[in-house]
Amino acid sequence: MKNILLPVSMVLALAAAGLAQKQPHAKSNEEVKALNDVFQATDVDAQIAAANAVLEKYADTEFKSTLLQMIAADYQRKNDYPKTIVYGDRALEADPQNYEAMLILGNEYAKITKENDLDRDEKLSKAEGYANKVLAIVPTAAKPNPRMTDPQWADAQKDLQSSAHEILGMAALTRKKTDLAVTEFKTSVDIAATPDPATYVRLAVAYNLAGKYDEAIATADKVATLPNAVAQVKSVAQAERVRAIQAKKKAAAATAPPAPATTPATAETPKQ
């Protein structure tokens, strides 16, 4: 899931300057400095430590939900599922309308849930619930930053909704609802201002599972043309393309009419 909003440090600068009445507001210069330490951290561990320091020292900070969301995102980058969930939940407790936290939680539940998990339906229902809440909130949400232009916010809204549809596609894939997965992944890439190459790969996987091999090949080929596709994603897309080609050949061989039977030549019986 890509980062789709402008840096929180821009919101902080506006709030500290008193330019945005509805934005979070730092209550002292010391809090501003502590928050800047969070936003200027150079790695996830440093950011987690700095954010927790703010939460401990300024328990009533108006940036509580944002900081908890950032920590959740950092743990998501570290592939620490339990802490991602804990901090994502805390971010939503602080602000039930925090749609970025919803996307983090929805993506995490959809990503880690396996077909044979005993609690599969419970976790997938949570993922789908968060995604659907985002789709309900974002279209009418106010700009998170007043200096954002209308076109910038429109693009951000598209990418937020795109991420929600990707979560729904991942959940559908785990439920083995391949046609629904195709629909959700295709919607995700179609509406995004900046489509995520990884979503194209998931779409190719869904097409393959649905037996739509030509579409899978075309989608995998698309990844190679995307300027924001990293080498690893391109490699996975290429592997999915090869899988589609092989599956297409196998399907064609299975439906090909049988070759006509040949009658063996009958040897002439010698006369007595």
Image (cartoon, grey):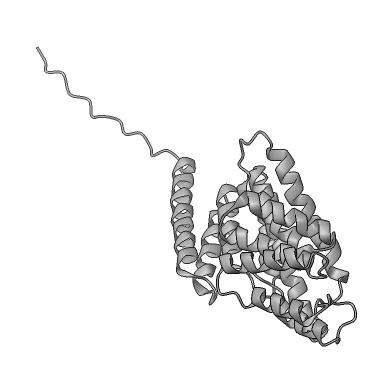
Question: Which part of the image, by quadrant, shows the C terminus?
Answer: top left
Q: Which of the 4 image quarters holds residue 159? A: bottom right
Count the labels in the image. Answer: 0
Position in image of residue 267 (x %, y %): 18, 24
Q: Residue furthest left?
A: 272
Residue at 45% from the left image edge and 55% from the top image edge: 245
Q: Nearer the viewer, residue 152 or 188?
A: 152
Quarter in which the N terminus is drawn: bottom right
For residue 238, what is the image quadrant?
bottom left
Q: Is residue 198 visible?
A: yes
Q: Residue at x 72, y 39 (%)?
A: 121
Residue 218 on image: x %, y %? 54, 64
Above or below, comparing residue 244 to residue 220 in the picture: above
Vertical position of residue 207 compared to residue 191: above or below: above
Question: Residue most toward the top?
Answer: 272
The correct choice, above or below, for 126 with respect to 13 in the image is above
Of 77 and 227, the residue lying toward us: 77
Which residue lies at the image location 38% right of the left edge and 37% below the top edge?
260
Tell me what residue is drawn at x 81 percent, y 62 percent.
Answer: 135
Comparing 267 with 229, the one in front is 229
The furthest residue to the right: 21
Q: Position of residue 250 (x, y in %)?
A: 44, 45
Q: Left or right of 139: which side holds 220?
A: left
Q: Position of residue 271 (x, y in %)?
A: 11, 15
